[in-house]
Image (tube, coloured by chain):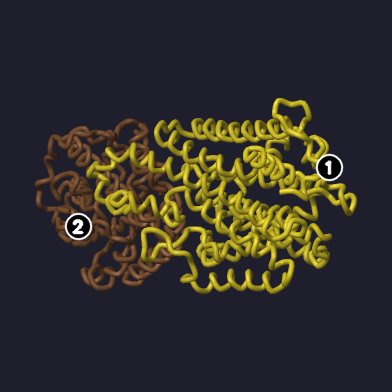
Amino acid sequence: MLRARQDDAARIERRDKPAVPLVAVDKTNSEEITTTMPSGQSVAQRDLRLDFFRGLALFCMFIDHMPDNILARFTIQSVMFADAAEVFIFISGYTAGMVYGRAMERQGFLLSGVRIYHRVWQLYVAHVFLFMMFMATVGFTAGALNNPVYAEEFGAANFLNEPGLAVVKALILQFQPAFMDILPLYIVLLAMLPFVLSGFKSWPWVVIFASVALWLAVQFDKRIALSAYPGPDHVWFFNPFAWQCLFFLGGWLGWRGNHGGVPSLKQRWLFYFAAAAALAGFVIRFSWTLHDLYDPLPVPVSMEFLWPLLSKGDLGFLRFANVLALALLVSRLVHPQARFLATRGAEPFVICGRNSLHIFCLAILLSVLGHLVLNEFFGGTLMQIVVSAAGIGIMISVAALMEWFAAAQRTPGSTAVRAPIPDGGARG
Amino acid sequence: MTLRSMSRTIIVIAAGNIGLLCAPTPIFAQERECSVPERFYVSEPQLTKTPKAIVHGQELVIVVLGGASTLGIAAGKPDLAWPARFAAAVAERFPSAHIKVVNLAVARQTAKRAAERLDGEVIPMKPNLVIWETGTMEAVRGMDIDEFRETLRAGIDELRTAGIETVLMNMQFSRDSEAVIHFEPYLAAMSQLADASDVPLFRRHGMMRHWAESGFLDLRVSDSDQRRRVAAKLYDCIGRAMADFVMRGSPGANSPPVKAGSAR
């Protein structure tokens, strides 16, 4: 009984996702009807842009997270001030606002809140799993770390001296060693989502204003941060008080998207303004990339002047503005069902983006492993490309497997015993 | 703990006309293996005043700031630390040089703490050059990157205002530390800062990685004697590479023992 309920919940979770970005063909029940169709048909109506660009961000995130990877010079971070993290968090916020915003309107606060917290729990488990991997690495290298050439410096790493405390701090998200900083951010953002969504329903402008004000406050006062281990002056790398703005702004847009979008965003001048901003961002950022590749090349604007606006942890103004400008451009220039998004070439991106929660966790896990492999065996550029390709191959394979599994579960008469569900959205 | 107690030790090396460095000790007989590829040097700005002063035999002071790896206790003796080997390498190649290298390294010192010492300790010594090794503590403890960069920038500006040239040196590399510590963002911050401030960056991390990749540097030895030998060899290589790095562009620097072309 319990098992059946779990499966049910899992399935509805899945089925709901395709339901999400559907273009509202009919006002009432058409979305649910479409969700019960095999994925091939419902896919045709999804907002494929969300899947595609989230998939792209996941690949970039994986590549960027392997130090010394030559390919990291060619990801989105080399052409805009923001990087994969901003793109991912924004699209995730948008999708979450759309899916759970609708769920909240239909199922009420409690039920949709529990669904969101089910996701939070999955992220938390992934975080704990990553921490296990980290501690395993530490355990493996502990013997070597006593080499006096660097032992003194590593003795300063508190987690080596007090592993017990480090475990507890990791469990309460305060210990964020290598690669373990983004999941805690995602966890707290999702955990806040039910409250923010119900705020959107009642006083949307108050919530948006508060969110932006909090982001702005962080820009001027660095003390607004979450403390981290080891204290006393350590804070979370991704400042949730700043990043919440990107996530919830995305969430608001996604929620409004369910109700016909935001008309003021469709004005012409805004489009030109965003285009100009994105172009300026591209010219400046790309000149830094080229300068980095070949030192004598000049840069129009020195990075030094823009540093105060480029903080990654605090989501500096330029990073924020650039990702918003890009989002506006994409939303206007790319049709939700643009033909290229449905091609075979786009499919790997789309399926990874569609299963983003799992592929996101997998990407982080793989970048840890890829980093260890590159670190252990070196091998230069060729090896970096091979490891990157292998990692992306694994991400795509797992996403494809998940797609296949989900489709198999939906198909009557498949090995997975399951009765067809008439309306997904109304249950949970 | 012993390292910490020794950490405040200030080692002053007077090298130059002393002559004890004319006959290198046998340990360093095959030191020439640790060549450094040109890519670590070419895009870095050259120093102007310091190499000239060295070539002309002027009396000059070079202050070194840093952490445990600059203190060099792993090699066993203070005069085996890289700043001492740097002084020796300069003296070897420029016998008329008259330099005093002052090693002010303190184990586990953060960039912030080192920067605070500039005003009271470093600048009063009227050094011609400050070599600032930093970044390790920040990476190990996962400290704020923006703040780290700003600290370095302020420090470099302070030294520049005092008419002192600066060389930055980044972290050490080892496979094992790399596995648990996320150095990349701190390396990038230092590299960007050096580029923006027009200060030469001695890329120790990259060099050590290069030596590890080429099989020359193996830090995975467990015997303590062997470890000491490896450390001494490493510090000697760093010191020599630093001598090359500092003397780039100066007359007479064309025949250094460590040549770019011989990189493996």
The residue depicted at 71 percent of the width and 30 percent of the height is A417
Residue position marked by numbered label 1 in the rendering: A34
Q: Nearer the viewer, mark 2 or mark 1?
A: 1
Which residue shows up at 68% across the image and 31% down it?
A405
- Identified by mark 2, the residue type is Val
- Left/right placement of residue B71 relative to residue A246 reads left
Which residue position is annotated with label 2? B101
- Relative to residue B177, is residue B127 depicted above or below? below
Q: Which color is chain A depicted in?
A: yellow
Q: Quadrant of residue B36?
A: top left
Q: Which chain is brown?
A: B
Residue placed most toward the observer, B12 or A228: A228
Q: In the image, is residue A15 above or below residue B133? A: above
Within 10 Å of disc 2 (Cα), the crowding (few <14, some 14-19, many 20+) is many
Residue sitting at 70 percent across and 31 percent down? A404
**Secondary structure type for disc 1:** helix
Vertical comparison of A269 with A120: above or below = below
Which label number is shown at residue A331? none
The chain containing the residue under callout 2 comes to B
Q: The disc labelled 1 sits on which kind of residue?
A: Thr
Q: Is A223 on the left-hand or right-hand side of A61?
A: left
Q: Say which chain tag 1 marks.
A: A
Q: Secondary structure at mark 2?
A: strand
